[in-house]
């Protein structure tokens, strides 16, 4: 899922297997963000909590599929052509309540676009969802002088989860780009939060990289930060290059991950990742 240069983290939780959960509740957070709360016996050993960027890989029928939940993914792959196989979509865990055995995922929704968004927009209590996980690798370094978190709408859940693990009083600068003012959420932190919202609707050009501009303009506090830069691949690559090459941030102080790529499906982005990783390394290679 990512190109990550974070410090060594705790071992990944066990149990990354296919699971089936039931929708317990839904909530519209913003025009483009829908919250789904899941539960069920398959979550008994889910085991999230070691990281704040935990994610799961959802299994969803493609549009027009001849089957729906409950389905057996292995059976479908064995007897149906590949274009009818379940689509895999990666989503961040917003919260895992181990006591209640409830998993919360916030879905980005843009009308009928995509596979997971339309599912979330139409989900109702009692619906079922298959997924595997959790994975994850990032946790705010408690020894860092300050924290920098940069992302777009799809990264809001991971950043929101991370803000609760910043040590009290430690500065944390958050730069988030969303569609517009209605997509802003109230975020809180145990640290000293400095939050900046940027709006795609305010771009002066379609290809303007507001997040790169904002990071470039940011006056860094003293000391070495722990940086979390996740989201659209082109943005992540540009900000990564700036932090490593111009700000001289140590690699071990950076978690950088391209969650998605403009104009590409998740399947296409998975095909592109090896080349993206190569180019990202080339960006900061010695001349």
Image (cartoon, rainbow, N blue to C red):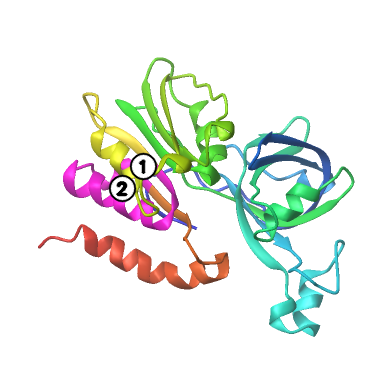
Which residue is drawn at the image coordinates 31% and 37% (left, top)? 214
Magenta-colored stretch includes residue 44: no
How far from the left and from the top, in percent, is residue 263?
A: 50, 65
Can residue 82 be seen here? Answer: yes
Q: Which mark is residue 239?
A: 2
Can you tell which quarter of the image residue 60 is in?
bottom right
How far from the left and from the top, in percent, is residue 270?
A: 50, 68
The secondary element bearing badge 1 is classed as helix
> Which dot, 1 or 2, sits closer to the camera?
1
Magenta-colored stretch includes residue 235: yes
Q: Are marks 1 and 2 in contact (CB under 8 Å)?
A: yes
Quadrant of the rendering where the C terminus is positioned = bottom left
Query: On the picture, is 73 further left or further right than 58?
Result: right
Which residue is drawn at the image coordinates 29% and 41% (left, top)? 213
Gap between marks 1 and 2 measured at Cα: 8 Å
121 and 25: which is toward the camera: 121
How far from the left and from the top, in percent, is residue 31?
A: 65, 39
Q: Which mark is residue 250?
A: none
102 and 49: which is toward the camera: 102
Magenta stretch in the rendered image: 229-255
Which residue is drawn at the image coordinates 24% and 47% (left, top)? 242
Q: Which mark is residue 211?
A: 1
């Amino acid at each position: 899922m990512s190109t990550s240069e974070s410090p060594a983290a705790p071992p990944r939780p066990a149990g990354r297997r296919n699971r089936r959960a039931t929708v317990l509740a839904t909530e519209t957070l913003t025009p483009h963000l829908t919250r789904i709360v899941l539960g069920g016996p398959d979550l008994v050993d889910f085991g999230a909590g070691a990281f704040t960027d935990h994610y799961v890989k959802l299994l969803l029928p493609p549009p027009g599929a001849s089957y729906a939940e409950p389905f057996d993914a292995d059976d479908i792959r064995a007897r149906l052509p590949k274009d009818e196989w379940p689509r895999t979509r990666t989503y961040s865990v917003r919260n895992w309540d181990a006591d209640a055995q409830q998993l919360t995922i916030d879905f980005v929704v843009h009308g009928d676009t995509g596979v997971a968004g339309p599912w979330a927009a139409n989900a109702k209590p009692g619906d079922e969802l298959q997924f595997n996980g959790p994975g994850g690798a990032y946790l705010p370094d408690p020894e860092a002088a300050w924290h920098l978190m940069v992302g777009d709408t799809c990264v809001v859940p991971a950043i929101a989860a991370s803000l609760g693990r910043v040590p009290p009083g430690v500065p944390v600068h958050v730069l988030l780009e969303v569609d517009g003012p209605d997509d802003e959420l109230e975020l809180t932190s145990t640290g000293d939060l400095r939050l900046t919202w940027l709006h795609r609707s305010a771009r002066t050009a379609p290809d303007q990289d507001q997040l790169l501009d904002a990071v470039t303009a940011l006056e860094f506090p003293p000391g070495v930060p722990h940086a979390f830069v996740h989201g659209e691949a082109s943005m992540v690559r540009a900000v990564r290059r700036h932090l490593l090459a111009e700000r001289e941030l140590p690699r071990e102080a950076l978690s950088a991950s391209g969650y998605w790529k403009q104009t590409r499906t998740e399947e296409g982005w998975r095909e592109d990742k090896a080349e993206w990783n190569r180019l990202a390394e080339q960006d900061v290679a010695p001349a």
